């Protein structure tokens, strides 16, 4: 079986440290070992209210962010989901056999429905995500921790389909980073870092000005006590900063505790901020060097390949269920 990785990200605005640590870093390393497909999931982005002009810009922006983060268009396929409409056809087919109950229990459906009202797109979101993954027969899906529930549903859907119609889909494995699977808000370390957070200081964007990044770390909420110690129950703010520092410095968590345990919180926050600013510098430079026209060209040609691959799977699926 081909080792294939698929993952997607929504073009809903800037990308942040959580997207980098939770997803992009694994996307990049997995290119070496897997046949890789990374997708700007714009069909998903319209499940929340949006401005058409902003979405248009964000679709290209996100593809540039993929490349700036290290996705190599020479090795990986990068396309926009709406350019490969076969995703939507497979979603319909998979939805035909999917019971209602699990979809209503999805945390993201509940959370986003509170913000935008109950919309069919939010309800069907995990079905489309299953189709995104299964249409490419992906064997591995690198995502952050927040996607665990959706991935479980994809695995159930693949197994149910195979059980009913014969082995068509591999059951994909979820890949999350050991450290940083859930990067938390710098202002409320009990909530995940998120692009839609209204608090400007909560989320660190990948290509933002280094001075702003430093300020955000200096203002990061810490905990009572004085010790720099890794303890999510007692010290969620410091534990979040330790994980971020570990990812950017390469030091292990015990090494960080040994070196910084007695330091003032303020000094530690500056050290984390500096490591992040340095780590993000090449990404920002790469992002600024990319040409929109060239990226458009990559997206167009890769989408053509994406459609061919998706058609191959759909052909098998149609035959399996009696539509061909
Ligand atoms: N805080 C996070 N920590 C680790 N991983 C994260 N991811 C997102 N936030 C964190 C991972 O990034 C990938 C893409 O996510 P997405 O853009 O498709 O949507 P999202 O999860 O809805 O991102 P946001 O920032 O939370 O957006 P809003 O605010 O619009 O809801 C996924 O692999 C995700 O796990």
Image (cartoon, rainbow, N blue to C red):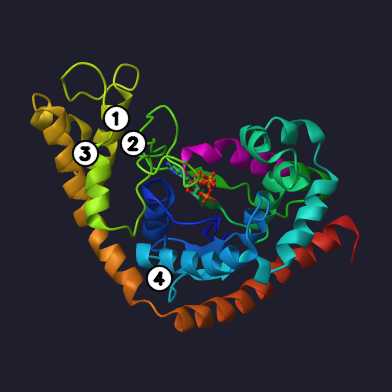
21 to 283, vertically: above or below: above
Please report whichever mark, 3 or 2, sits nearer to the chain's N-terminal start.
Answer: 2
Please report whichever mark, 4 or 1, sits nearer to the chain's N-terminal start.
Answer: 4
Q: Which residue matches tag 3?
A: 218
Q: Dot 2 surroundings within 10 Å: few (below 14), some, or many (20 or more)?
A: many
Please say if the residues under marks 3 and 1 sit with CB atoms less than 8 Å apart: no
Instruction: Find out whether residue 117 is within the magenta segment.
Output: no
The quadrant of the rendering that contains the C terminus is bottom right
Q: CA distance from mark 4 to mark 1?
A: 36 Å
Q: Dot 4 surroundings within 10 Å: few (below 14), some, or many (20 or more)?
A: some
Q: Dot 1 surroundings within 10 Å: few (below 14), some, or many (20 or more)?
A: some
Q: Secondary structure at mark 3?
A: helix
Please report whichever mark, 4 or 2, sits nearer to the chain's N-terminal start.
Answer: 4
Q: CA distance from mark 4 to mark 2?
A: 30 Å
In x, y percent, where is residue 225? 19, 16
Q: Nearer the viewer, mark 4 or mark 2?
A: 2
Please say if the residues under marks 1 and 2 sit with CB atoms less than 8 Å apart: yes
Q: CA distance from mark 3 to mark 4?
A: 34 Å
Label for residue 72?
A: 4
Q: CA distance from mark 3 to mark 2?
A: 10 Å
Q: Which residue matches tag 1?
A: 221
Q: Secondary structure at mark 1?
A: loop
Q: Residue at x 25, y 65 (%)?
A: 282
In x, y percent, where is residue 161? 77, 47
Q: Magenta region: which residues?
A: 144-158
Q: Which residue matches tag 2?
A: 186
The quadrant of the rendering that contains the N terminus is bottom right
Relative to 123, 297 lies left or right? left
Q: CA distance from mark 3 to mark 1?
A: 9 Å
């Amino acid at each position: 079986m081909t080792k294939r990785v698929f993952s997607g990200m929504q073009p809903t605005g800037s990308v942040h440290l959580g997207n980098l640590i939770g997803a992009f870093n694994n996307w990049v390393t997995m290119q070496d070992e897997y046949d890789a497909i990374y997708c700007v999931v714009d069909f998903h982005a319209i499940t929340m209210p949006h401005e058409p002009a902003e979405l248009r810009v964000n679709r290209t922006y996100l593809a540039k962010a993929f490349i700036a983060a290290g996705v190599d268009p020479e090795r990986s396929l990068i396309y926009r989901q709406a350019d490969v409409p076969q995703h939507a056809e497979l979603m319909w087919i998979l939805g035909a056999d999917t019971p209602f109950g699990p979809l209503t229990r999805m945390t993201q459906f509940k959370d986003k429905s509170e913000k935008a009202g109950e919309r069919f797109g939010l309800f069907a979101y995990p079905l489309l995500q299953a189709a995104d993954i299964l249409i490419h027969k992906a064997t591995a899906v690198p995502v952050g921790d927040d996607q665990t529930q959706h991935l479980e549903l994809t695995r159930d859907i693949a197994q149910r389909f195979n059980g009913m119609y014969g082995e068509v889909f591999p059951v994909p494995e979820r890949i999350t980073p050991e450290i940083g699977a859930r990067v938390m808000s710098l202002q409320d370390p009990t909530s995940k870092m998120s692009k839609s957070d209204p608090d400007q200081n909560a989320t660190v964007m990948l290509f933002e000005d280094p001075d702003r990044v430093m300020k955000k770390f200096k203002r990061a909420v810490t905990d009572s006590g004085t010790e720099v110690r890794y303890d999510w129950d007692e010290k969620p703010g410091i534990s979040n900063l330790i994980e971020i520092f570990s990812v950017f410095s390469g030091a292990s968590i015990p090494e960080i505790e040994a070196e910084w345990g007695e330091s003032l919180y303020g000094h530690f926050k500056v050290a984390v901020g500096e490591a992040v600013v340095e780590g993000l510098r090449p990404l920002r430079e790469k992002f600024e060097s990319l040409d929109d026209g060239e990226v458009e060209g990559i997206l167009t040609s890769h989408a053509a390949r994406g459609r061919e691959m998706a058609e191959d799977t759909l052909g098998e699926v149609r035959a399996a269920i009696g539509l061909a």
